[in-house]
Amino acid sequence: SYVLTQPPSVSVAPGKTARITCGGNNIGSKSVHWYQQKPGQAPVLVIYDDSDRPSGIPERLSGSNSGNTATLTISRVEAGDEADYYCQVWDSSSDHYVFGTGTKVTVL
Amino acid sequence: EVQLLESGGGLVQPGGSLRLSCAASGFTFSSYAMSWVRQAPGKGLEWVSGISGSGGSTYYADSVKGRFTISRDNSKNTLYLQMSSLRAEDTAVYYCAKPVGVVHAFDIWGQGTMVTVSS
């Protein structure tokens, strides 16, 4: 089965840039989606199709995908960005959705 | 407003059964495939099962295949998950989720319903 690997945690100072990676075999050939989840809340889609933002998601959040790594970038980090972030793809070979292991972003 | 509302969670003994429901509103329910996603306490997201808009095709994670059954009633705008032979490792918050049209990403999630499997 397809596996997506994320770093368990990322720490960043306010105003700086956080980069969260999502590794998978030839992930660049797939569409990657990203979710933000705050404690006690349902996940929120923040990036779909590698780099598109749903309405209401700030431009500070951006995505890229190439080779074996997809990346979610949060620019000018704010306290409100502190959350867990998950990448996700559709594995067409198994007709399964696959989520990454998740990354906890801490704002210092 | 597009909304999903899960119900049916609770405490069940190992080996028991439970049926979850997800009531949808604010969109043409039958036009969308739907999924169940779960999250064990303190753990990450795990896709559990999906169903096509017509209900004719169903998909399951290996961890629940043969034990869980997904279904839908488009006349009632409701998604179901019948869970049987429940195990302690099935303890989780269960979310229903709607995809972004033909994009395999979930733009609408319910608030979740907690399932606890314990004696």
Image: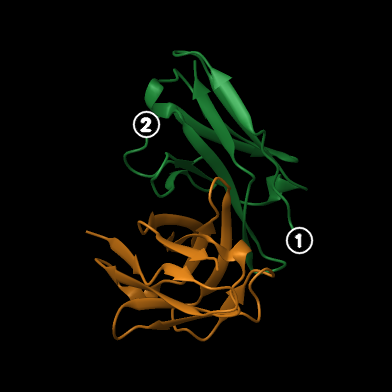
The Cα–Cα distance between marks 1 and 2, rounded to whole angstroms, is 33 Å
Q: Label 2 neighbourhood size at 10 Å, few (<14), some (14-19), many (20+)? A: few
Mark 1 vs mark 2, foreground winner is: 1
Quadrant containing the N terminus of chain B in the rendered view: bottom left
Q: Position of residue A88 (x, y in %)?
A: 59, 50
Supply the letter of whichever chain is green: A
In terms of sequence position, does the residue under pointer 1 or pointer 2 come before the other?
Answer: 1
Quadrant containing the C terminus of chain B in the rendered view: bottom right
Q: Which residue is mark 2?
A: A58
Q: Residue at x 70, y 50 (%)?
A: A29
What amino acid type is highlighted by mark number 2?
Answer: Pro
From this view, report whether residue B89 is shown above or below residue A83.
below
Q: Residue at x 67, y 68 (%)?
A: B63
Badge 1 marks a residue whose secondary structure is: loop
Residue A1 marker: 1
Q: Nearer the viewer, residue B60 or B83?
A: B83
Q: Position of residue A77 (x, y in %)?
A: 45, 20
| Image quadrant where residue B60 sits | bottom right
Supply the letter of whichever chain is orange: B
The chain identifier of the residue carrying mark 1 reads A
Q: Position of residue B52 (x, y in %)?
A: 49, 77
Residue B88 horizontal side relative to residue A58, left or right = right
Q: Nearer the viewer, residue B5 or B3?
A: B5
